[in-house]
């Protein structure tokens, strides 16, 4: 596949800088909600990424994230 065709394919399929996202609201602690979401994603065999304070807290727990 030539460069031009690859570029056209990328342009037509790229979701944009925001990528895919979803939102939810819950009363449990944010990290507990993230862990439940990650477990569900694993069960459904789909990708799931931690971001922001939630991701940082997984690697170096010392904060209490207010958002995940």
Image (cartoon, grey):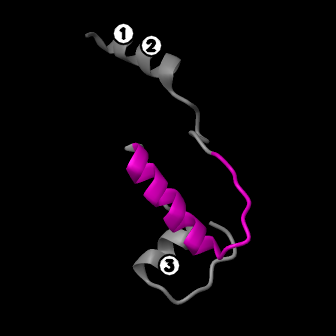
Image depth: mark 3 or mark 1 in front: 3
Looking at the rendered structure, which numbered label has been put on residue 57?
3
Q: CA distance from mark 1 to mark 2?
A: 5 Å
Determine whether the residue tagged by mark 1 lies in a helix, strand or loop.
Answer: helix
Q: Callout 1: 10 Å neighbours few (<14), some, many (20+)?
A: few
Q: Which residues are magenta?
A: 22-44
How many marks are shown on the rendered structure? 3
Q: Is residue 44 visible?
A: yes
Determine whether the residue tagged by mark 3 lies in a helix, strand or loop.
Answer: helix
Name the residue beneath numbered marker 1.
5
Task: Give the image location of residue 68, x and y in percent.
Answer: 62, 66
Rendered position, 58 above or below 37: below
4 is within the stretch colored magenta: no
Task: Give the image location of residue 63, x and y in percent.
Answer: 58, 86
Residue at 50% across, 67% down: 35
Q: Callout 3: 10 Å neighbours few (<14), some, many (20+)?
A: some
Task: Name the quarter where the N terminus is drawn.
Answer: top left
């Amino acid at each position: 596949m030539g460069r031009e065709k690859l570029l056209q394919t990328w342009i037509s399929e790229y979701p944009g800088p925001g990528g895919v996202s979803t939102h939810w609201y819950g009363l449990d602690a944010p990290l507990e909600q993230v862990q439940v979401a990650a477990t569900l994603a694993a069960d459904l065999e789909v990708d799931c990424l931690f971001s922001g304070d939630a991701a940082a807290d997984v690697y170096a727990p010392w904060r209490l994230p207010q958002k995940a």
